[in-house]
Every structure is written in C-alpha cells, then in structure tokens.
Amino acid sequence: MPAASEPRLPRTWRPLGVRMAGLVFGLGLLVVCIVAWWSFDAEVRARFTTFQRGTLVFLGLLIYGAGYALARSRVVATPERLVVVNGYRRREYTWPEVLAVHMPPGAPWAVLDLADGTSQPAMGIQGSDGPRARIAVRELRELIDRQPG
C-alpha cells in the first residue's frame, strides 16, 4: 500500500491561477464589450460595417482561443506514461523517457528532462501557483524516481 504522501495514479495537475485569471478577465472583457456596444446609440451602431463587426468577433474568438489553450494545459501521470498537454499540443512519454523534473525559483512552469537530451515544458504546473506548484513538482519527482530503470 502506498504511503499517505505518495501520489496515487492516475494523477492530473492543472494550473489554477491561469484558469481563474482567464475566466475572470475573459468574462470581464465580454461584459465591457457588451456594455460598450449597447451604450452606443442606434446611429453609431448602424455605422459599423459587416466587416468591422466580423473583425471584432474574430478578435474576441482569438483571445478566447489563447485563453482556452492556456487553461487546458495539464500534466497527467498514469501507470504506463506521462501525458503533457501544452496549449493545443499533446505529448506522451513512457516513464523511462522522463529523467527528471525541475522548476527553479521564478520559472514560469516546470520543465521535464528527457532521455534523448531534450527538455519539455510542462505548462500544467505553473510557477505562479506558488506552493501548489512546488507540491506538484515534488509529487511528479517522486513518481519519476519510483519508476524502474
């Protein structure tokens, strides 16, 4: 039976601060835009062309897409592999491929050292989450150290 401090699998780490900021600022921006639009009188709203309205909608969707990409970032540890989702890109690593994880003070997110000599950012563990991120790095490090090989 695993010790109480050992992480159980499967385990998922997600950034809390980024998700909350995206939600709060995204909703805030949406409310400001809607209030601003309806504060214009009918004559001013009528002067907006279809292209201008489409451009505003496109920019809104672009901002939403960037926020969603950051919010969907995660690191998932399963008994077989480690899955890293950074934005819209997903990578899967078997445990022997992952040598270490580190997050120096002031780093934006954790970084995985891989067996092929490269490193991979793990944006699901954000440095801005403070103690929560340090705990996540410690748990992931324990999982890496526990793997055979």
Image: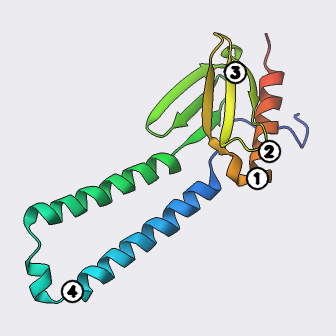
Residue 104 placed where, x, y %?
78, 37
Question: Which of these two is toward me, 34 or 7?
Answer: 34
Q: Amino acid at mark 1?
A: Gly
Does residue 61 appear anywhere in the picture? Answer: yes
Q: Amino acid at mark 4?
A: Phe
**Mark 3 or 4, nearer chain start:** 4
Mark-to-mark CA distance, 3 and 1: 21 Å
Q: Quadrant of residue 139?
A: top right
Q: Do the residues bearing badges 3 and 1 touch, measured as CB atoms within 8 Å?
A: no
The disc at residue 140 is none
Q: CA distance from mark 4 to mark 1?
A: 43 Å
The residue drawn where x is 8% and y is 65% is: 50
Give the residue number, with chain letter if any, for mark 4: 40
Question: With respect to residue 37, does 72 lie above or below?
Answer: above
Describe the element under mark 2 as helix, strand or loop: helix
Residue depth check, mark 3 versus mark 4: number of the one nearer the observer: 4
Residue type pointed to by label 2: Arg
Query: 76 or 88, which is in the foreground?
Result: 88
- For mark 2, what is the residue? 134
Side of 94 relative to 9 (left or right): left
Residue 11 can be seen in this image: no
Circle 1 crowding by C-alpha within 10 Å: few under 14, some 14–19, many from 20: few
Q: Tell me which label, 3 or 2, sits earlier in the chain.
A: 3
Cβ atoms at labels 1 and 2 below 8 Å apart: yes
Question: Residue 122 at what x, y percent from top left?
Answer: 62, 35
Q: CA distance from mark 3 to mark 4?
A: 54 Å
Comes first in the chain, label 4 or label 1: 4
Residue pointed to by mark 1: 130
Q: In terms of secondary structure, where does tag 3 sit?
A: strand
Q: In the image, 143: left or right of 93? A: right
Task: Tell me: residue 26, above or below residue 1.
Answer: below
